[in-house]
Amino acid sequence: MKKKIRWGIVGLGRIAKLFAEDLQLVKDAELVAVASNNMDRARDFAEIFGVQNYYENYENLFKDKLVDIVYVATLHHTHARVSIAAMNHGKHVLCEKPVAINQRETKEMVATSNVNRVFFMEAFWTRFNPSILKIKELIDSGEIGRLRYINAEFTFYKLDDDPNARSLNVDLAGGSLLDMGVYPIFLSYLMLGVPKDIVAKSKFFDTGAEIQTAMIFDYPEAQAVLYSGFANNTDMKAKICGEEGEIFIHPIWHETQGFTLVKNGWQKTYDLPTIGKGFTYEILETHKCIGQGEIESKIWSHNDSSSLMEVVDSVRKLAGIEFPFEHQ
């Protein structure tokens, strides 16, 4: 019988719950421990998912010999510190996006993975979505010709959130860019790579948090127009346009269940529903890599996470997005 890979989860918010639900759909996965800074939350989460070990201290979970890999779903500004601590305890790590606050932190996480020879990956679930995999395959095969234009956005109205909570609090790395903007940036990066030039402008909330960011990425033969925001809602579609056709990714595009290819006056719709919410695919990739003794994925590599954060850093610099703790 194939040995199960035993998971621990730290940071027990909404995303962690969705992830844990999908973890139950993967046969060789077992959730054995959870941890939160709040003991009641840890106990409640453990009861919901039938987990025996729960902690109010992340360090205790990292010391748990039952845990093979840690899923890090803590607040953005703690991703690097928590992931590095887990890896220094010999645990593999799957860390929620954004993988870190900046590229410097990302490189520290990658270095820790290399030193400890443990698997480390950013949990960019969209990269493993069946539709995104198929779209990438079609584009690489030249199905829509040379790429010329990408348009993608990700928004949710959040201006009525508690200003002290995560989204609008600069002390917690709040703002739409790290929360949502990484998705449109990811799509452009995946299809076209690191842009040659960037234009970026942001709007800010009373708390100092960035709430709207518009971006233009310029490439030698293509452009991408991207947007993230807390100040409005949109239909959250995305499109990729080549000289010979277009691909329309069905909303909500970053967790899409299909897409439509339009070419030469005809169109074809691909229906590719996900298993569960869609976290299952990054879990399966993680298991595959660990089983093969790899410390990174070829599909979403250490370099991919670092390069993406390099682009995010450039956008932040141009738009004036800063966090107080980065200058302490």
Image (spheres, rainbow, N blue to C red):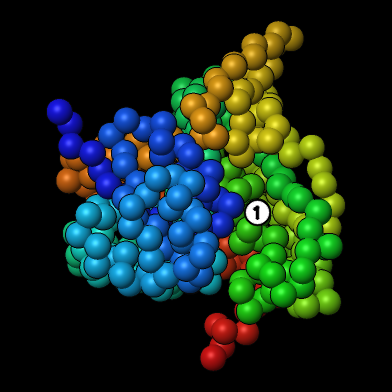
Direction from residue 251 to residue 68 in the image, left or right: left
Residues 244 and 275: in front is 275
Residue 109: % across, % down: 35, 66
Residue type for callout 1? Met
Q: Quadrant of residue 255?
A: top right
Residue at the spot of label 1: 180
Direction from residue 319 to residue 146 in the image, left or right: left
Query: Is 299 placed above or below 314 here?
Result: above
Direction from residue 245 to residue 191 in the image, left or right: left
Residue at 83%, 58% in the rendered image = 231
Q: Quadrant of residue 206?
A: bottom right
Residues 189 and 130: in front is 130
Could you say whether the residue bearing mark 1 is in a helix, strand or loop? helix
Residues 81 and 318: in front is 81
Q: Quarter of the image containing the N terminus?
A: top left
Q: Taking the image as drawn, is residue 127 in sight?
A: no
Q: Residues within 10 Å of mark 1 (few under 14, many from 20)?
A: many
Residue sticking out furthest to the left: 1
Residue at 42%, 70% in the rendered image = 56
Q: Quarter of the image containing the C terminus?
A: bottom right
Residue at 58%, 52% in the rendered image = 14
Residue 257: % across, % down: 60, 26
Query: Is 83 placed above or below 308 here?
Result: below
Q: Taking the image as drawn, is residue 323 in sight?
A: yes
